[in-house]
Image (spheres, rainbow, N blue to C red):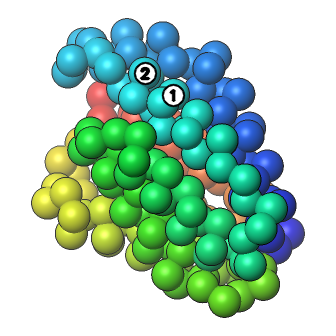
Amino acid sequence: MAITVATVADLVQRANASIKVHEQDLNAADSRLGDGDTGGMLARVIGTMAEQDLSGAADPGAALSLLARAAASATGSSLGTLLATALLTIARETKGQPEIDPAARADLVGKARDAMMARGGAKLGDKTVLDSVDAAARALSGAANPAQAVSAAAEAALADFR
């Protein structure tokens, strides 16, 4: 299924509903390694993104650019900055395209990963979110069921982390 502005808008709304359910779990997990605010930060960022009216966006790239700006304005955290960087990277790559071809997903996620690495300075294997993004990029390549493939890849990346 091609990714359109409507697809992007639906994904953000679903992410917003999901983060509300998982915010405290993420905070609890983060408190074991960090300052315990990852869930709250993601809820704030995704909530701000969900408030954006994407209906006037000319294409998915324009919608993603709007979301990147919203994400950047909602937080100064390193993870929020990396999320905005990923969105902006994919926005630039898809600018002017009426829809994003599903076959391009792996390449786009790979480019987002590379931009996140350049921005944040981390490397694969440093046990950061980049390891999961990399696993997703690899899983998307030729996946018949992208959601299932990414979920399995994320679980595998988490197991490697442990």
Instruction: Give x and y (percent) for residue 89.
Output: 44, 73
Residue drawn 51% across the image and 28% down it: 43
Instruction: Give the answer, above or below, for where 106 lies relative to 19.
Output: below
* Residue 7 percent across, percent down from the top left: 80, 59
Q: Residue 107 or 7: which is nearer the viewer?
A: 7
The one nearer the camera, 17 or 31, is 17
Image coordinates of residue 156 in percent, x first then y, are 46, 41
Q: Is residue 161 left or right of residue 4?
A: left
The residue positioned 71% from the left and 88% from the top of the image is 97
- The quadrant the C terminus occupies is top left
The relative height of residue 71 versus residue 140 in the rendered view (above or below) is above
Residue 142 in view (yes/no): no
* Between 111 and 98, the one nearer to me in the picture: 98
Mark 2: few/some/many CA within 10 Å (<14, 14-19, 20+)? some
Does any portion of residue 24 appear in the rendered image?
A: yes
Local packing at callout 1 (Cα closer than 10 Å; few below 14, some 14-19, many 20+) is many
Name the element at disc 1. helix
Q: Which residue is drawn at 26% across and 39% down?
A: 77
Q: Residue at x 65, y 49 (%)?
A: 52
Q: Which mark is residue 16?
A: none
Q: Residue 43 carries which label?
A: 1
Provide the residue designation for mark 2: 40
* Residue kind at label 1, given as amino acid type: Ala
Circle 2: element type? helix
Given contact means CB atoms under 8 Å apart, are the residues at marks 2 and 1 in contact?
yes
Q: Callout 2, which amino acid?
A: Gly
